[in-house]
């Protein structure tokens, strides 16, 4: 089975730009998670979907971050407008409801200039 | 709210030895799952092993095993016969069983360096 895929792997944006990160979960998984990882804050949950319904939207990230599940096998994370402090690795993970282990994608490294 | 604490920031060992990484947690849930994940230098995060709180037996997968001490709210990861490629960041995580959420709470990670 294919694992979680994320594109692009690297993204460089100018301050104020809009960027869209993409994620395809493991086939059949119905829980999908977006995380941000930085050295200072560690792993932070941005959004959590179950069967395409938004279950949790990280409060601190609501204003410029918007995650969507367009269908059960595709999700996007939009950051609008980007700021230099958004530079981080963005990770997507999925799991089977009831399976509990999350499987992570390779991440997208975002640099905002 | 749940909390996971990994007090060891980094550990260095010689290959082929055994290493234990500590993790303590806080939760109000009566039943829960505990996990260990590994993040390699490339950034890949890989699930390693899981402990169910209602099981007394310590979980074991390959050369990974757990030291689950429920009264101490502690879940240590033991790696035996360490190899150079075990060098990575190890994260402890947890979630409640009887909650309608798959959300995990992660610790800050422990950097393991295995030297020849």
Image (tube, coloured by chain):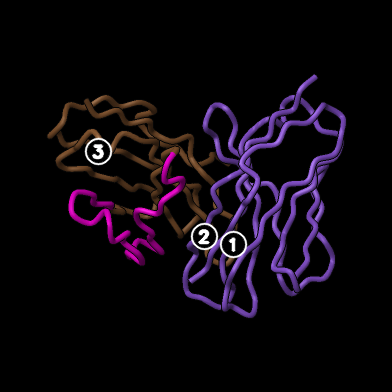
- Whether A48 is among the magenta residues is yes
Q: Which chain is brown?
A: A
Give left or right: position of A38 versus A100: left
Mark 1 vs mark 3, foreground winner is 1
Range of the magenta residues? A40-67
Q: Mark on residue B94?
A: 1
What residue lies at 53% left-to-right and 54% top-to-bottom?
B106
Where is residue A72 drawn, in percent x and y? 38, 55
Q: In the image, is residue B1 above or below residue A94?
A: below
> Which quadrant of the figure has residue B111?
top right
Q: In the image, is residue B60 above or below residue B29?
A: above
Secondary structure under badge 1?
A: strand
Give left or right: position of B3 versus A109: right
Where is residue A45 drawn, in percent x and y? 40, 54
Mark 2 vs mark 3, foreground winner is 2
Answer whether labels 1 and 2 touch (C-beta < 8 Å). Answer: yes
Q: What distance separates the C-alpha of mark 1 from that of mark 2?
A: 5 Å
Residue tagged 3: A20
What color was chain B assigned in the picture? purple
Residue tagged 2: B104
Quadrant of the snapshot with the C terminus of chain B? top right
**What chain letter is assigned to the residue under label 1?**
B
Of the pair A77 and A71, the residue shown nearer to us: A77
- Whether A91 is among the magenta residues is no
Q: In the image, is residue B28 above or below residue A57?
A: below
Q: What distance separates the C-alpha of mark 1 from that of mark 3?
A: 30 Å
């Amino acid at each position: 089975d294919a694992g979680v895929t994320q594109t692009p792997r690297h993204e460089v944006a100018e301050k104020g730009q809009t960027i869209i990160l993409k994620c395809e979960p493991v086939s059949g998984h119905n829980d999908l998670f977006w995380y941000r990882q930085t050295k200072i804050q560690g792993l932070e949950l941005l959004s959590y979907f179950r069967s395409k319904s938004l279950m949790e939207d990280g409060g601190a990230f609501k204003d410029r971050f918007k995650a969507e599940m367009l269908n059960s096998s595709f999700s996007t994370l939009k950051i609008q407008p980007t700021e230099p402090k958004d530079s981080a690795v963005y990770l997507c993970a999925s799991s089977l409801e009831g399976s509990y282990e999350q499987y992570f994608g390779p991440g997208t490294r975002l640099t905002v200039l | 709210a749940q909390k996971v604490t990994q007090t060891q920031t980094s550990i260095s060992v010689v290959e082929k030895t055994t290493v234990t990484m500590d993790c303590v947690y806080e939760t109000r849930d009566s039943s829960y799952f505990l996990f260990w994940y590994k993040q390699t230098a490339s950034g890949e995060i890989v699930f390693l092993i899981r402990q169910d709180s209602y099981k007394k037996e310590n979980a074991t997968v390959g050369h990974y095993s757990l030291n689950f001490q429920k009264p101490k709210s502690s879940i240590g990861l033991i790696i035996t016969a360490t190899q150079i490629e075990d060098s990575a960041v190890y994260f402890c995580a947890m979630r409640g069983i009887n909650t309608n959420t798959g959300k995990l709470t992660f610790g800050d990670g422990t950097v393991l360096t295995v030297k020849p």
